[in-house]
């Protein structure tokens, strides 16, 4: 007895398959970011900007802010520094926070978002200490 397969896809089957495909697309880049952050927090060697594998999270494009003489070029994606010292849960030690900022620099980030509202000059001083030595 031969059974025929129904090759038609139901709406439920379509939604299941697209959800799985979407999850697969999102997991790989996210996993790379998680493992990179874990390496920085645990103190493993940071990745050099010149040796970043093509599949690993890195900022490879830039944008220009402003115009005329006031224009300057920064990375297309910035690093939000609020979580370094202003958050509602536990956060890493100062040394590990500095290592995270340096990891961002090594991955091509040149725009760091900080504000006095994260603690009067606390965040700016922390980011400044982390960026000490990076002149370009």
Image (cartoon, grey):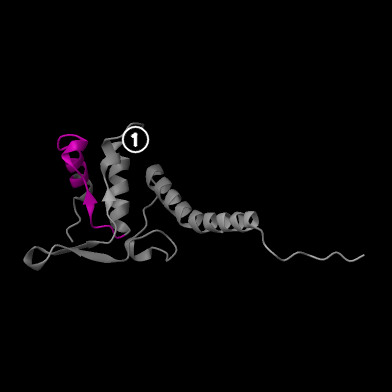
Find out whether residue 116 is within the magenta segment: yes
Q: Determine whether 68 is above or below 134 in the image.
A: below
- The residue positioned 30% from the left and 34% from the top of the image is 87
Instruction: Identify residue for label 1.
Output: 91
Instruction: Say which quadrant the N terminus sits in.
Output: bottom right
Marker count (numbered) = 1
The spot of residue 63 in percent (x, y) is 23, 65
The spot of residue 84 in percent (x, y) is 28, 40
- Camera-nearest residue between 113 and 20: 20
Residue lying at the far right of the rendered structure: 1
Q: Which region shows up in magenta? A: 108-128
Q: Is residue 127 left or right of residue 61?
A: left
| Quarter of the image where one finds residue 74 | bottom left
- The residue positioned 30% from the left and 66% from the top of the image is 61
Q: Determine whether 98 is above or below 90 in the image.
A: below
- Camera-nearest residue between 59 and 35: 59
- The residue positioned 30% from the left and 42% from the top of the image is 97
Find out whether residue 56 is within the magenta segment: no
Q: Is residue 132 left or right of residue 2?
A: left
- The residue positioned 40% from the left and 48% from the top of the image is 37
Q: Determine whether 82 is above or below 13 in the image.
A: above
Instruction: Say which quadrant the C terminus sits in.
Output: bottom left
Density class for disc 1 (Cα within 10 Å; few <14, some 14-19, many ≥20) is few
- Camera-nearest residue between 85 and 66: 66
Residue lying at the far left of the rendered structure: 69
Q: Secondary structure at mark 1?
A: loop
Q: Is residue 65 left or right of residue 62?
A: left
| Quarter of the image where one finds residue 55 | bottom left
| Quarter of the image where one finds residue 57 | bottom left
The spot of residue 39 in percent (x, y) is 41, 48
């Amino acid at each position: 007895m031969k059974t025929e397969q129904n090759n038609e896809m139901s709406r439920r089957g379509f939604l299941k398959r697209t959800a799985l495909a979407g999850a697969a697309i999102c997991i790989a880049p996210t996993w790379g970011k998680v493992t990179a952050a874990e390496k920085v927090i645990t103190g493993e060697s940071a990745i050099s900007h010149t040796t970043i594998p093509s599949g690993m999270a890195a900022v490879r494009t830039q944008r220009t802010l402003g115009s005329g003489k006031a224009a300057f070029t920064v990375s297309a994606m910035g690093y939000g520094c609020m979580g370094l010292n202003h958050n509602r849960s536990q956060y890493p030690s100062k040394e590990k926070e500095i290592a995270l900022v340096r990891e961002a620099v090594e991955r091509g980030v040149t725009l760091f978002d900080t504000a006095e509202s994260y603690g009067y000059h606390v965040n700016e001083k922390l980011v400044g200490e982390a960026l000490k030595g990076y002149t370009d």
